[in-house]
Image: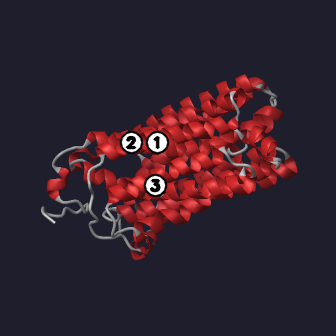
Amino acid sequence: MDGVVTKSGAPTDERNKARWGAVVSLSLGVFGLVTAEFLPASLLTPMSADLGVSVGAAGQSVTTTAVVAAVAGPAIVVYTGRFDRRTVLLALTGLLVVSSLMAGFAPNLPFLLAARVLLGIALGGFWAMSLALAMRLVPARLMPRAMAIVMSGVSIATVCAAPVGAWIGATLGWRYAFLLAAVVGVVTFIVQALTVPSLPPIGTTGLGTIVRVLRRPAIRLGLATILLVVTGHFAGFTYIRPYLEQVPRFDVEMITAILLAFGIGGFFGNIAGGFLAERNTRLSMTLAAAGIAATALLLAVAGVLPGIAAAATAAWGFAFGALPVSVQSFISRAAGDEAEGAGAATLTTFQIAISTGAILGGLIVERQGPAGVFMFAALAALLGASLVAVSRKVALQPG
């Protein structure tokens, strides 16, 4: 291959020109995948009624995607190393379309879970490859800007997915929300096909790389924080609609508005978390986790009051919005030149935490109702915040 290979693994001639159209197409992919992943959180009540299953059982559609993504991400990076990365990217976007169509026409819960398996493969593979793809699409000096564009897809999906899903579910039916996700996937596929250049394979990332980064204390601290806080968060978030229906007793219109406030809070939380993480990643992580714990506790003990439930949910969105950028900044600083291995480990931990939270949340909801799950969320997030706060001796330097 022509060109000198840089430390990032991309030939220098490949990175001299910024391909912003391709970067935007990655952001579209993030938006479509994250939207599809979390649509069930705003649709559990109509989904469970239509499919004839309990709310807890329907919530496992979130668990299934997360479990599969946790395995699929590292596996796709390791086992598709011989293929052009453009081809792999388009295949993953195609899975998003197929999965969304299957979910929209699912006649029963097993068929829906099969659709969510395909989404998990697409989600895990895309996230595991996203950093390496961005590194090959822009010069090194423009990487922060490129990643900001890619991650904007998450912010927009956070704002849109839950409230739009709830509104579509109430007006047209929950299936149309997934069919709309399929349309987004088709648009994304077309844009990627037109903008992403051929990206022949360059080297490989093996399982040994992931094992090496796990030996670093700061990496382990960051992953443990993710496991605790994200588990607690998704124990509550997966069942947010039943909670809002049964505890403060909001109607569909009010639930849609509150979920929109949650998403907007997450958008601004992401900005605030990034601003603070540039200065002190440990403080940013601690404050984000503590904010999740405080708002979850407020929902658990005083959520029966409509005003408190609405305000706490919006504040919860802000706190969680700050968490991913804070943790990823912490881990990336600790990873040094093993960023891809650390990224795969982070992806897997996130998905394990999401699936664990959905499972535990379902068990708690079935036994104690939706209010009980937020006490668990508060305790888990508080443990995560405490872990970071007391681990001041863990160095961030790689090695």
Please name the residue shown 50% across and 47% down the image: 324
Q: Is residue 2 above or below residue 182?
A: below
Horizontal and vertical percent for residue 105?
67, 45
Question: Which quadrant is home to the N terminus?
Answer: bottom left
> In which quarter of the view is residue 12 placed?
bottom left
| Image position of 50 (left or right of 14) | right
Mark 1 surroundings within 10 Å by alpha-carbon count, few (fewer than 14), some (14 through 19), many (20 or more): some
Identify residue for label 2: 190
The answer to the question of whether label 1 and label 2 lie on touching residues, with beta carbons closer than 8 A, is: yes
Q: CA distance from mark 3 to mark 2?
A: 13 Å
Q: Is residue 132 above or below residue 237?
A: below
State how the image is colored: secondary structure
Residue 203's disc is none
Please name the residue shown 71% across and 54% down the image: 60
Mark 3 surroundings within 10 Å by alpha-carbon count, few (fewer than 14), some (14 through 19), many (20 or more): many
Q: CA distance from mark 1 to mark 3?
A: 12 Å
